[in-house]
Image (cartoon, grey):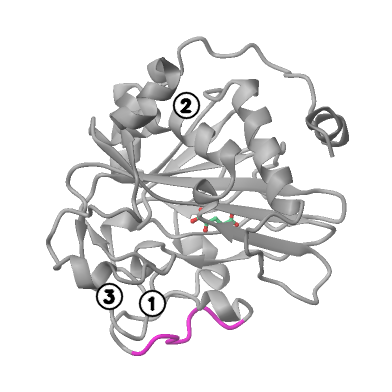
């Protein structure tokens, strides 16, 4: 398919809002305080439609039988939930998005770091009819890191009601790190001890929703949710005629260090060899985690 045909075949709609000429100004002191207190904040209209177009083209390449491995979470069920990770490495549009769009700079301002590295990027695509909730979980039990200067930007290509949006338990990043669900067995009860006893089992948040300060938002494409990866999050089922095509881009700063995880808990994504080159407590530096800011000089040269 030619580039032009790909654009015509896509769902791209003209922008319904005036682009924000200075997205970095949206990261105000009060946004930073909300992020630090609640572990999550939604910022409206920070991504120009051009970046959404680039993201949509990247997603089309992923779905168009690229070399990306697609993980189907709800295989055999009505709605699909497709996940692909490390798109940066194989999808040129996602690489461009991460280097050239303001996403990294927005996160840098939020976490207070001028040096920035990519932890991972991951597509989460719900389409094709009713697609079930994403189980409640935190990300950090699966990530070999310690430190605080890290945030995930969750970006949806679709308009979402607050019921279809990802949900977050405000403030939970300050509390216990729980065991969480097993990504290979997504339909299993997330409160079961999946990985041994190193982390306590998750509470049953769905059965006791009123006991938790759950946040979610109505989303217009261009809005971005920034979340700390230790905040509990889940949810966002889709209905018979809705879809939710989102990417999460995780970026970290100076204080993030390598940490070990229990052997029973495989890290996501897998990083074979990392434990042979780093000792717990070392700054997290490895080709697995490319530097994004300042832009490496060999990449800057591409602009001249
Ligand atoms: O979009 C989803 O359903 C899951 C997103 C998620 O777990 C994440 O961004 O870490």
- Dividing the picture into quadrants, the one containing residue 277 is bottom left
Is 194 one of the magenta-colored residues?
A: yes
Q: Is residue 156 left or right of residue 7?
A: left
Percent x, y for residue 291? 31, 41
Disc 1: which residue: 179
Percent x, y for residue 238? 75, 55
Using the numbered discs, state the Cα–Cα distance from disc 3 to disc 2 in whole angstroms: 33 Å
SS for dot 2: helix
Percent x, y for residue 85? 54, 58
| Disc with the residue nearer the chain's start (3 vs 2) | 2
Which quarter of the rendering shows the N terminus? top right
Disc 2: which residue: 100
Q: Is mark 3 within 8 Å of ligand 1?
A: no
Q: Is mark 1 within 8 Å of ligand 1?
A: no
Percent x, y for residue 267? 38, 71
Q: Is residue 46 visible?
A: yes
Q: Is residue 295 visible?
A: no
Count of numbered marks: 3
Camera-side mark, 1 or 2: 2
Disc 3: which residue: 261
SS for dot 1: loop
Camera-side mark, 3 or 1: 3
Dominant secondary structure of the residues highlighted in magenta in the image = loop
Is mark 3 in CB contact (under 8 Å) with mark 2?
Answer: no
Using the numbered discs, state the Cα–Cα distance from disc 1 to disc 2 in whole angstroms: 36 Å
Camera-side mark, 3 or 2: 2
Give the magenta range: 188-196
Is 128 one of the magenta-colored residues?
A: no
């Amino acid at each position: 398919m030619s580039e032009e045909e790909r654009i015509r075949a896509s769902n791209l709609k003209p922008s319904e809002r005036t682009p924000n000429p200075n997205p970095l100004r949206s990261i105000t002191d009060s946004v930073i305080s909300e992020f630090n207190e609640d572990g999550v904040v939604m910022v409206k209209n920070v991504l120009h439609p051009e970046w959404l177009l680039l993201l949509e083209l990247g997603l089309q390449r992923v779905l168009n039988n690229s070399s990306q491995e697609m993980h189907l979470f709800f295989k055999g069920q009505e709605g699909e939930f497709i996940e692909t990770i490390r798109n940066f490495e194989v999808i040129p549009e996602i690489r461009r998005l991460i280097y050239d769009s303001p996403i990294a700079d927005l996160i840098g301002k939020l976490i207070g770091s001028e040096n920035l590295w990519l932890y991972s990027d991951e597509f989460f695509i719900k389409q094709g009819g009713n697609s079930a909730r994403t189980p409640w979980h935190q990300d950090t039990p699966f990530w070999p890191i310690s430190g605080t200067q890290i945030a995930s930007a969750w970006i949806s290509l679709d308009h979402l009601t607050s019921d279809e949006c990802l949900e977050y338990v405000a403030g939970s990043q300050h509390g216990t790190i729980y065991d969480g669900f097993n990504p290979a067995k997504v339909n299993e009860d997330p409160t079961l001890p999946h990985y041994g006893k190193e982390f306590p089992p998750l509470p049953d948040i769905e059965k006791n929703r009123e006991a938790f300060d759950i946040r979610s938002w109505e989303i217009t494409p261009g809005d971005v949710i920034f979340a700390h990866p230790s905040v509990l999050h889940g949810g966002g089922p889709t209905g018979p005629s809705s879809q939710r095509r989102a990417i999460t881009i995780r970026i970290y700063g100076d204080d993030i260090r390598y940490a070990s995880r229990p052997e029973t808990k495989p890290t996501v994504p897998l990083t074979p060899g990392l434990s042979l080159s780093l000792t717990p407590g070392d700054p997290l530096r490895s080709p697995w985690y490319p530097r994004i800011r300042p832009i490496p000089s060999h990449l800057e040269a591409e602009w001249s």
